[in-house]
Amino acid sequence: MTETIAREIRALLKERNAILLAHNYQRPEIQDIADLTGDSLELSIKAAKTDADVIVFCGVHFMAETASIVSPDKTVLMPRRDTGCPMADMITPEALQARLAELGEMPVVTYVNSPASVKAHSTICCTSANAVAVVNSLAEDEILMTPDRNLCQYVASKTTKKIHCWAGYCPIHDRLSTGEVLNAKAVHPEALFIAHPECRPEVLALADAVLSTSGMLDFAKHSVHRSFIVGTEEGLIYPLQKANPNKSFYRASDAMVCEDMKRTTLEDVLRAIRTMTYEVKVADKVCRRASKAVERMLEVSGR
Ligand code: 13P
Ligand code: SF4
């Protein structure tokens, strides 16, 4: 059954000159059939470079919006309409303007996990992979960072700049506790603990490395260590294990499941490419302004 659907999807993708992108947290069967997988930064770069006419994005809404921002001439499809990001919903352009009115004008660094309308009001974007470099690339010494307070505090610990943090958070990463990490370490004393910067500061303080999802894949591949406790959404365990069959990966917690990331099924992908729905298109004015913030980030990342 799965193979038949996968074959149909591949045939339709070819027919429509379409490319299938999947975030590292997607279901295994979606990752297996995707042309490209990656973290938020990789996927936005790959989306910009592809010659395909159509991008089918398996991830959450802000990711498809970012693809539309960097590739305004391509058709961007999301297989489901109901895959949002609770953290991205914790900020609006109006609330951002109000905060800037309180603080005074200063550069705004916005994590890609945010609505396009907020990117359009930001100086520059960042991802978990390049946030420190992005902040350090700015001439100003005082910055407002949105919407993730945990990523913000992590960056603040790595720079001399004064950073004001927005109070948003990822409910999935924020729920990982030090108690759970210490338990996992007690059960697997030989394992390294790798954590995503969306985790709380006290959790990051226990980490051997703080990395984006693709940073974790790279780290595990090149490390001489053979076992790892993984402090991020559980979907990453699949590509980690697939790429490193002789190494062991343990969940830091069983509660780190992002329902939005898990919603998309192969059936949804087939329907999306068959019916060319649901299109994600960022309005021209927002797109032009948001694109400046994304392009500026890509320049810092040297891509
Ligand atoms: P990265 O894949 O960029 O590390 O992001 C994690 C995430 O939470 C995406 O929703
Ligand atoms: Fe948003 Fe967190 Fe889910 Fe990523 S894992 S999509 S940040 S809720």
Image (spheres, helix red, strand yellow):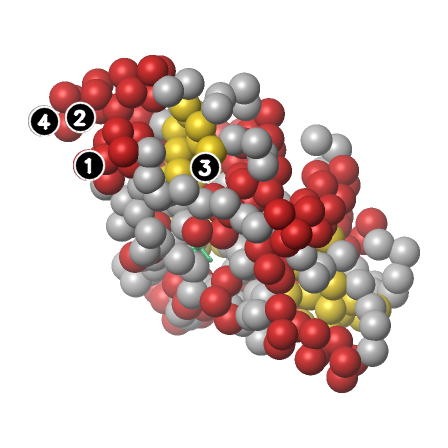
Amino acid type at mark 1: Glu
The number of numbered badges drawn on the structure is 4
Which class describes the residues within 10 Å of circle 4: few (<14), some (14-19), or many (20+)? few
Q: Kindly identify the residue that appears in the image at 69 percent across and 80 percent down.
A: 98
Q: Which residue is mark 2?
A: 5
Q: Ligand 2 is located in which of the four quadrants?
A: bottom left
* Callout 1–callout 3 Cβ contact below 8 Å: no
Q: Is residue 248 visible?
A: no
Answer yes or no: do the residues labelled 2 and 1 have beta carbons within 8 Å? yes
SS of the residue at dot 1? helix
**Which of the two discs, 4 and 1, sits closer to the camera?**
1
Q: Residues within 10 Å of mark 3 (few under 14, many from 20)?
A: many
Mark pair 4, 1: CA separation: 10 Å
Indicate the secondary structure of the residue bearing disc 4: loop
Residue at 34% across / 15% down in the picture? Answer: 15
- Label 2 Cα crowd, 10 Å radius (few <14 / some 14-19 / many 20+): some
Q: Earlier in the sequence, mark 2 or mark 1?
A: 2
Q: Nearer the viewer, mark 4 or mark 3?
A: 3
Residue 291 position by quadrant: top right
Q: Is mark 3 within 8 Å of ligand 1?
A: no
- Disc number lying in front (1 or 3): 3
Residue named by callout 4: 1
User: Could you say which is closer to the camera, residue 45 or residue 236?
Assistant: 45
Task: Name the side, left or right, on which 32 lies relative to 295.
Answer: left
Per the image, the residue denoted by label 1 is: 267
